[in-house]
């Protein structure tokens, strides 16, 4: 049984962005194995490398995944291929003409084949999610997969050991990615989040109560409604209105002649929603559907959010006339700045309901671990990536990200050969 | 032998308390906890770690603006090696005049910067308010580009490098060329130096992004910006596209990995095609196995002295032939499927029925290697009299 995941005493490097891991990585040196038996050397190498590569995969499973054959490619120059047909390599005594040492073409660096032994684990979905920088560790990626936040080719995939095939696209829920890669909330932000949740819960309770009261005698009982709330959370209202619109659209688009049972149900549901909305104290009194929809669309239009209040520049919100007047006095360059700041604030708003610090910023220590191997094509804006091909080795370069050197990897490879 | 009484590691100078140990508060607050099983060593290591994280390691807490920030780019003391080298180079080589010039430049840049500071302070202020910025990063002189050494995230593994990713502009250019201008994936790949499979993936991902945009689904733009700023990127320069990666990768065939001695007469012209056949009978030479064979053909015609217009004409004809051959193959396949396969759709799954001639696959005696019975069900005959057990052919 493992005692610590990130140990300082018994150092194991892990697939994670943890600061303990960073410290271990920064001070790591190849283990001293000169004075040990060959078996012990292999054992150490295996144990160290397996702690990094697929540590959630059991040894027996990994044994089945392991392949002796390793994929490699060599870049070919079409010009060189066109100008020589290869016979120059067979000239002289059968191994090319003798040329002076200083005229010999530079030979390619060796292909580090044995750095690729753990290529099969890179096919796993959880590892790929981590490699695409969508999670801060493979374990977190695994959790995302199991909890159903990851889709492969548009279908939910809940198995972290799913072997991706070339061309598979995987997507992670953006909110989860922002949580995994974003900075953590500080104390004040957590408190603000709690407050917001409490307010929302009380509101929901109040709304339910009012609903249950108002349902038997519908719009004719405005007095029984609770006192008007201070501010309906924009998100909730937005959601409800969105659903309303989509329902309305669905009903309007279907042919009116086909009045099936489903359609009747839909209509009834729609009516109920409209009534509920109208029974709210802040809603309109008109009952026509058109005006209601127009009202909804007006509400749906994105409101310019206020810029970050802690700004020292005191960016004008353009809501009060004084600030607007001030904005009018700005130079074009400053106005441009202002616009950029506003755009950024809109793109990356403060939202206490999120589980990460807002406005979003990358979590600490992330940059030391941020790299994307070439066998993935990642599009961060939509938190999606395509596994384009299996990892390959090429002269002087192995695509499997492994923290250990060639010697240790070759010892580990030796361990997994059938006859060790 | 009576059990040994363990001595506490550190002798406390305090008088022994008369109260029982579970009530003792004062002793437990001292640095050496007598009743704790935590080893002192681990605590010291943790102290060391935090000392490193707050000292030399603190450079990794925040990303380095406009650059990657990997462990190998720093020395033990947490100094950026390339910045240090640059400073050393300036001190050694720079004459008085050069220094004066650079100072002037600095002043100019400072003035230009004044306007931009507003943007930065406006947008990045919330970060700065919480964490003091790094002193080294506020250098006026831009950092030199990363070397290959600086791009190694794992200090022990020199065979792994953080390779550049496509910049947003390059992705846009790929999408534009394929979807708007209607160019083929092959042409775009050759023109921009991006692998064909990557071109396909970019187009697919971009299409999803457009779909999200049209639906109004929020994009993770701040995350994307932050991550891309931490990675090396291939920029897009419209008139002079940079090669992103090698596009003519030849997979190393398994048959070619073993050394082979082939006796050949001296007069024979032994080329790549012959070598491939020596390794394996059906193995094609490298020029026929690379992804962009058309680039090889163009070079070959040029080498043979064919004029440019003629080359382009030939390539056009070849492309057209390829297109029609592919279309014909596809049509034939579809036609065959239509006539031979009966489909039964059950909503959840589609059953396909196809007539199979057993004789052809399994042979007259039903023992053919392609038949089902070869592996399951048909008893072996190798114990019969006169049957040869040793395989006569290695396949």
Image: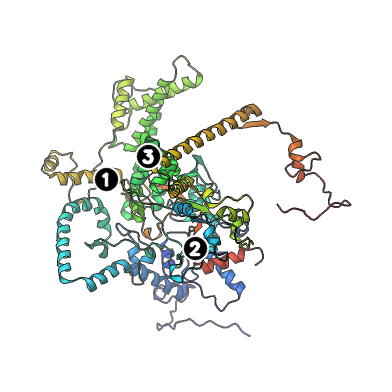
Q: Which residue is mark 2?
A: A5
Q: Which residue is mark 3?
A: B177
Marks 2 and 3: in contact by CB < 8 Å?
no
Q: Where residue A159 sits: x, y (%)?
A: 55, 47
Cα–Cα gap, marks 3 and 2: 48 Å
Q: Nearer the viewer, mark 3 or mark 2?
A: 3
Is residue A41 among what the camera can see?
yes
- In the rendered view, would you say B184 is above or below B106? above
User: In the image as oriented, which residue stretches furthest toward the right?
Assistant: B385
Cα–Cα gap, marks 3 and 1: 33 Å
Instruction: Write down the chain letter for disc 1.
Output: A
Of B228 and B96, which appears nearest the observer? B96
Instruction: Write down the chain letter for disc 3.
Output: B
Q: Split into 4 quadrants, where in the image is the C terminus of chain A?
A: bottom right
Q: Where residue B176 sits: x, y (%)?
A: 36, 39
Picture quadrant where residue B61 is located: bottom left
> At 50% from the left edge and 70% from the top edge, which residue is drawn?
A10
Q: Where residue B65 sits: x, y (%)?
A: 29, 57
Q: Nearer the viewer, mark 1 or mark 2?
A: 1
Crowding near the residue tagged with mark 3, few <14, some 14–19, many ≥20 C-alpha atoms within 10 Å: some
Of B269 and A174, which appears nearest the observer? B269
Q: Which residue is mark 1?
A: A345
* Left or right: B221 as drawn, with respect to B300: left
Scheme of image coloration: rainbow
Query: Secondary structure beneath disc 2?
Result: loop
């Amino acid at each position: 049984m493992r005692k610590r995941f990130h140990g300082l005493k018994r150092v194991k490097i892990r697939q994670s962005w943890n600061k303990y891991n960073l410290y271990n990585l920064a001070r790591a040196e190849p283990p001293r194995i000169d004075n040990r038996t060959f078996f012990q050397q292999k054992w150490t190498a295996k144990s160290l490398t397996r702690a990094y590569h697929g540590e959630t995969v059991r040894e027996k499973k990994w044994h089945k995944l392991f392949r002796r054959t390793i994929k490699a490619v060599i870049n070919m120059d079409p010009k060189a291929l066109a100008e020589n047909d290869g016979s120059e390599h067979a000239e002289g005594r059968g191994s090319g003409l003798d040329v002076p040492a200083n005229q010999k073409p530079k030979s390619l660096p060796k292909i580090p084949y044995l750095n690729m032994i753990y290529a099969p684990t890179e096919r796993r979905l959880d590892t790929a999610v981590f490699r695409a920088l969508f999670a801060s560790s493979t374990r977190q990626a695994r959790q995302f997969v199991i909890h159903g936040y990851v889709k492969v080719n548009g279908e939910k995939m809940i198995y972290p050991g799913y072997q991706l095939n070339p061309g598979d696209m995987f997507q992670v829920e953006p909110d989860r990615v922002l949580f995994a890669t974003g900075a953590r909330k500080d104390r004040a932000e957590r408190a603000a989040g709690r407050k917001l949740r409490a307010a929302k819960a009380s509101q929901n309770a109040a709304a339910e109560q009012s609903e249950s009261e108002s349902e038997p005698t519908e719009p004719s009982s405005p007095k029984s409604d609770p006192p008007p709330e201070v501010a309906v959370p924009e998100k909730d209202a937005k959601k409800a209105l969105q659903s309303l619109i989509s329902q309305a659209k669905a009903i309007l688009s279907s042919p009116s002649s086909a009045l099936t049972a489903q359609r009747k149900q839909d209509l009834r549901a729609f009516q109920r929603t409209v009534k509920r909305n109208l029974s709210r104290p802040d809603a309109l009194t008109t009952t026509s559907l058109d005006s209601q929809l127009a009202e909804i669309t007006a509400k749906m239009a994105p409101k310019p959010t206020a810029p970050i209040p802690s700004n020292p520049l005191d960016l004008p919100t353009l809501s009060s006339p004084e600030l607007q007047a001030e904005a009018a006095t700005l130079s074009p360059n400053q106005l441009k700045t202002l616009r950029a700041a506003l755009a950024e604030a809109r793109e990356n708003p403060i939202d206490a309901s999120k589980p990460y610090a807002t406005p979003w910023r990358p979590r600490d220590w992330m940059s030391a671990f941020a790299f994307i191997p070439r066998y993935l094509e990642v599009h961060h804006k939509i938190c999606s990536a395509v596994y384009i091909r299996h990892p390959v080795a090429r002269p002087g370069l192995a695509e499997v990200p492994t923290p250990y050197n060639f010697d240790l990897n070759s010892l580990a490879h030796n361990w997994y050969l059938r006859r060790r | 032998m009576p059990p040994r009484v363990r001595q506490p590691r550190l002798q406390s100078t305090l008088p022994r308390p008369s109260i029982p140990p579970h009530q003792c508060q004062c002793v437990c607050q001292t640095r050496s906890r007598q009743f704790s099983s935590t080893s002192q060593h681990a605590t010291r290591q943790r102290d060391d770690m935090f000392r490193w994280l707050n000292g030399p390691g603190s450079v990794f807490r925040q990303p380095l603006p406009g650059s990657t920030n990997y462990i190998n780019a720093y020395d033990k003391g947490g100094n950026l090696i390339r910045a240090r080298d640059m400073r050393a180079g300036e001190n050694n080589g720079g004459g008085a005049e050069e220094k004066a010039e650079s100072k002037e430049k600095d002043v100019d840049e400072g003035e230009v910067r004044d306007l931009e500071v507003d943007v930065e302070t406006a947008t990045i202020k919330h970060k700065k308010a919480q964490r003091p910025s790094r002193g080294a990063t506020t250098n006026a002189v831009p950092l030199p580009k990363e070397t290959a050494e600086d791009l190694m995230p794992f200090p022990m593994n020199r065979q792994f490098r953080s390779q550049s990713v496509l910049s947003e502009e390059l992705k846009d250019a790929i999408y534009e060329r394929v979807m708007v201008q209607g160019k083929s994936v092959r042409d775009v790949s050759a023109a921009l130096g991006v692998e064909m499979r990557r071109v396909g993936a970019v187009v697919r991902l971009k299409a999803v992004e457009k779909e999200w945009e049209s639906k109004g689904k929020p994009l993770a733009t701040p995350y994307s910006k932050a991550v891309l700023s931490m990675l090396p990127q291939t920029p897009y320069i419209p008139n002079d596209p940079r090669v992103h990666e090698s596009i003519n990768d030849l997979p190393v065939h398994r048959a070619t990995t073993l050394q082979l001695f082939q006796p050949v007469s001296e007069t024979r012209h032994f080329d790549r095609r012959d070598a491939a056949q020596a390794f394996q009978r059906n193995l094609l030479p490298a020029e026929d196995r690379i992804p962009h064979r058309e680039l090889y053909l163009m070079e070959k015609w040029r080498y043979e002295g064919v004029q440019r217009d003629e080359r382009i004409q030939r390539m056009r004809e070849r492309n057209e032939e390829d297109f029609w051959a592919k279309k014909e193959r596809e049509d034939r396949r579809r036609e065959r499927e239509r006539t031979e396969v009966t489909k039964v759709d059950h909503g959840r799954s589609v059953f396909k029925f196809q007539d199979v001639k057993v004789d052809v696959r399994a042979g007259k005696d039903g023992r053919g290697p392609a038949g089902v019975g070869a592996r399951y069900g048909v008893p072996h005959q190798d114990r019969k009299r006169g049957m040869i057990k040793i395989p006569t052919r290695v396949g």
